[in-house]
Amino acid sequence: EDQVTQSPEALRLQEGESSSLNCSYTVSGLRGLFWYRQDPGKGPEFLFTLYSAGEEKEKERLKATLTKKESFLHITAPKPEDSATYLCAPYGGSNYKLTFGKGTLLTVNP
Amino acid sequence: NAGVTQTPKFQVLKTGQSMTLQCAQDMNHNSMYWYRQDPGMGLRLIYYSASEGTTDKGEVPNGYNVSRLNKREFSLRLESAAPSQTSVYFCASRKDNPSNQPQHFGDGTRLSIL
């Protein structure tokens, strides 16, 4: 059975305080991994796709990396508007089914 | 840029009532999905449709039925609602080609069953 664990469950940072979120997984036939951002009352919003170990993607203050067993979302000098729940979702098999983690709730205080 | 549109946004039902949740996408995507999101749990797949006319069960299909009405629309029906089906329901769609495309989500339907 595919499993995904995200840590920490919640993270509180001061504005400008960099940190990392972790996503570890066991997925058969892994094809890649997505990172999403979810704001309260909204659906998940796509951030990144990572396909292979060693790959990195960047967008503004966010950088996602991938190894064979885990992915990290690094947040550099975060701002209050980065506050959200961040979801990772590895996928595998021929039908691209996603397995979502429970998410990390990030709060950035001004 | 509507993307994925879900209706209604909120609904309260009594146990035993039936209801259909509607989802439409305007991105010409082939694949569509229904998920539920509960506190402390990740998004769980209920049903999906790889193309018009086909549907398949996901992780938690019991108590639900779906219809892929056409390429744009994918509905989720609760025939006899139960309190355990209180949840936030998300619809998503995905472009199949090229491969490895992400799913794009609507903003959800918040359903309470009393």
Image: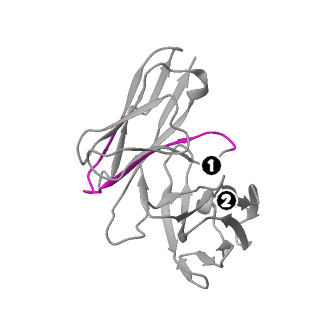
Q: Position of residue A4 (x, y in %)?
A: 67, 59
Q: Which residues are magenta?
A: B22-40
Q: Calculate the distance from the C-alpha at mark 2 to the C-alpha at mark 1.
A: 9 Å
In front: A72, or B70?
A: B70
Q: Is residue B107 in view?
A: no
Q: Position of residue B53 (x, y in %)?
A: 26, 44
In front: A107, or B110?
A: B110
- Quadrant of the rendering where the N terminus of chain B is positioned: bottom left
Dot 1 amino acid type: Gly
Q: Quick check: do tags 2 and 1 share a chain? A: no
Q: Mark 2 highlights which residue?
A: A4
B81 vs B7, left or right, is right
Assign a secondary structure to mark 1. loop
- Are the residues at dot 2 and dot 1 in contact (C-beta closer than 8 Å)? yes
Tell me where residue B102 sits by quadrant. bottom left
Please tell me whether mark 2 or mark 1 is closer to you in this view: 2
B34 inside magenta stretch:
yes
Q: Mark 1 highlights which residue?
A: B42
Q: Residues within 10 Å of mark 2 (few under 14, many from 20)?
A: some
Query: From what the image shows, is residue A102 above or below residue A89?
Result: above
